[in-house]
Image: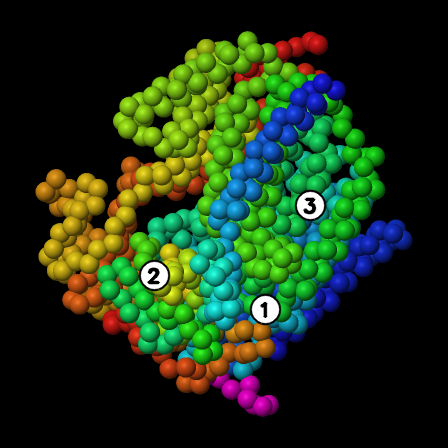
Amino acid sequence: MENLGALSLILAFCFSIYAIFGSVVGKWKQRPFLVKSAERAVIAQWALQTLASGFLVYALMTHDFRLSYVASHVNTAMPTLYKFTAWWGGQEGSLLLWSWILSCYSALVVWQNRKKFREMMPWVTATLMVTQAFFLLLIVYPLSPFEVLAVGKEIRAVPDGNGLNPLLQYWSMAIHPPTLYLGYVGFIVPFAFAMGSLITKQPGDAWIHTTRRWTLVTWLFQSMGILLGAGWAYAVLGWGGYWGWDPVENASLLPWITATAFLHSVMMQEKKGMMKVWNMVLVSATFFLCIFGTFLTRSGVVSSVHAFAQSPIGPYFATFLSIHIAATTWLILDRLGYLKSEAHLESVLSRESSFLFNNLILLASCFSILWGTMFPVISEAVTGEKISVDAPFFNRVNVPIGLFLLLLTGVGPLIAWRRSSFESLKKAFLWPTVGGVVLTGVLFGFGIRHFYALMSFALCAFVLITIAMEFVKGARAIASKTGQNLILAMVELTHRNTRRYGGYIVHVAIVMMFIGFTGAAFNKERTIEVGMGDKFTLGRYELKVASIEEGQNPNYSWGHAVVEVYQGGKMIDTLTPEQRLYSAGQGQQSSVVDIRRRLHEDLYLNFAGMQNGKAIIQAYIFPLVGWIWLGFAALIFGTLVCLVPSKIRYEFAKTKVMGVAPGVSQPKAVTGD
Amino acid sequence: MKPYVKFGLLTAVIIGTLAWLAVGGISETKSYYKEVAELKKMGDDVYTKRLRVAGDVAEGSVQRSGSEVRFLLKQNDLTIPVLYDSMDPLPDTFKGGAQAVAHGKMGRDGVFHANKIDAKCASKYEAKPGQKYQPPGQTAPPASDTKASF
């Protein structure tokens, strides 16, 4: 069985190599049957990888402890769900998942475009398969998931396995890796189309139109993956943080940032024919950062609390990345002539320039995070000493960046294309500015003095008002024509131009998250040893440890503190933070916090154990943190809205004056030069 | 070309500000990664720099009182006493025998004052390169010096 699994992977590797040569040679020598056979090879290697994955999952579910991977990541006591998720619980398995997802995407691309883009497709296939072959090579040779435990020549099973890391036995951690992978692996498709269009010297935009949806969907998965990870850290790691600027977290954020920049700058190319080179650079950078992130997580080059293994795959990735970067750079430079901009920047006060600043700032943030993450490696190479920077470094640079981006979120969509006058700006931004200033005044009056917090709340109000005004203005125009009420008119408005208004919803989601982030400026915390029946206070809450309960199941034994929560003398809730001792391995300990989630603040309790008959309770109040998760939901909704086809298709004539197309509620564009 | 000049100037201002913030951020938060043995050789430098010390938590050395935790960080036969006193709970992976990194400063009293501890039992979940999974029974006996009472 494990032999069949390993064999399918080897065959899949051969097919992917064949697909590379088949499509390149077929295109070169004009042999359509070769190109066709290469595409079939893509489907075949997908089928083979699916088979191999099936074998691995079957082995995990049936406790085949002869396999090293199974013995390390599963035990008999684990719930069935986590036996399945153990597929990506370790190095080898998660690389297999990565590779399998890539094969799914590749097969889908080949099938979707079987009659389209005949010129470009062979190169798209080849680009996809180069990466595919690389990942298959990793799981065929240095990190096979099908390795058996053997003593001498005899294969020997162990009686029970190690079990999955208890920290990973949590619902959002079960789906976090596949979601993230769906996002990161998916970005290879826009990259492959970009390369295809560069190689075949196709003028600008075909690749952008075909990959628009891919880009959005993968961006959605990336966002979901990152936020699921943050939610997991918050609910499981026990210190209430959702983001610690850990190298692995940073690795997942980097491609997201460049992807976000790409989503914005791509509009410049679609509507104005500008920034073509830049978009090529962004899409390639995103792809490289996805690979780089996988490398960082999987190679242990920067040590991290995520505690992935040190492994021998570092040099493989380094080679793969350098060859790719060199080839892409050469290709872009060589094809510069085909990527000429069709329009020029006319004014600093224009939509174009707000997009440029958006990109600049996102890239600056990306660079600072990359620099901070790699600082130990860089400093060791330069000075011989390993120097790390901490969370305060990242916050210091990225908090102002975040606030500036928030400002652009409000300003950008309202500025006209080409150029804008101060008069029109005054009109558009009067009420949002008033709103922001009033809110700051009120908060200041309530005694809030934290500079960044005040600024963030003011900007949140500013952005929300601009977006609300956009919706109301557009909806009114529709309502006056059709006689619908305002709410229905808003739905109609959104449906008419889903990308625009879906985008606004995503912007609202970002504002909601910023509200949540800002709450962190007001966290309260307390660690205390309390006897049974004793009370202590935190903020407006009175907390009483009523009793300690204990129990056991095959997977772990547990003990939890029953903490009664009082407010104003009345009991409002009971929380039960828990400690678990997993039976597997060496008795891994795990705390399970209990959280009373409310929109204005979370009460967060961690039970740190017993000391001289007293319970050690770590109690925290996290104001507004719930808005992050609410923003998460809004982000998914907004992105889905963007994916719905617009009811009315706008034909944008390139380089003509934008913003006056009927029904588009742009602020009045300044026409004429 | 005028818009491009203006745009360039604004860009320069933004990048300049961020670079200034970044440089300040680095010099304020940079900390030196040392193993226990390296730390011992640092001389007087040891008291002024922010440090991250890596080693193994010595078995049986973990003592808790209130929110304070004291333990020995060791590498081969060298050890350093560590005092951890912070609001944040220690990671679940922290226990005797675990690999740990203590973030903090060396006190003149010879005790390392840590404000953050990372720990991992790497050996358990993932084999190191060149070292494969060992069936249970051949590994070290379970550590029992921590709060494992349930």
Packing grade of label 3 (10 A; few <14, some 14-19, many >=20) is: many
Identify the image quadrant of residue A613.
bottom left
Give whichever of A150, A297 is nearer the camera: A297
Regarding residue B115, the answer to whether it shows in the image is yes
In this figure, which residue is indicated by the disc labeled 3? A284
| Mark 2 to mark 1 CA distance (whole Å) | 31 Å
In this figure, which residue is indicated by the disc labeled 2? B84
In this figure, which residue is indicated by the disc labeled 1? A311
Instruction: Give the number of the disc on residue A545.
Output: none
A152 inside magenta stretch: yes
Residue kind at label 1, given as amino acid type: Ser
Q: Position of residue A68 (x, y in %)?
A: 52, 77
Secondary element at image label 1:
loop
User: Does residue A542 lie above or below A169 as drawn?
Assistant: above
Q: Position of residue B13 (x, y in %)?
A: 60, 29
| Mark 3 to mark 2 CA distance (whole Å) | 45 Å
Q: In the rendered view of the protein, which quadrant contains the C terminus of chain A?
A: top right
B40 inside magenta stretch: no
Regarding residue A113, the answer to whether it shows in the image is no
Residue at position x 72%, y 55% in the image: A322
Identify the image quadrant of residue A34.
bottom right
Q: Are marks 3 and 2 on the same chain?
A: no
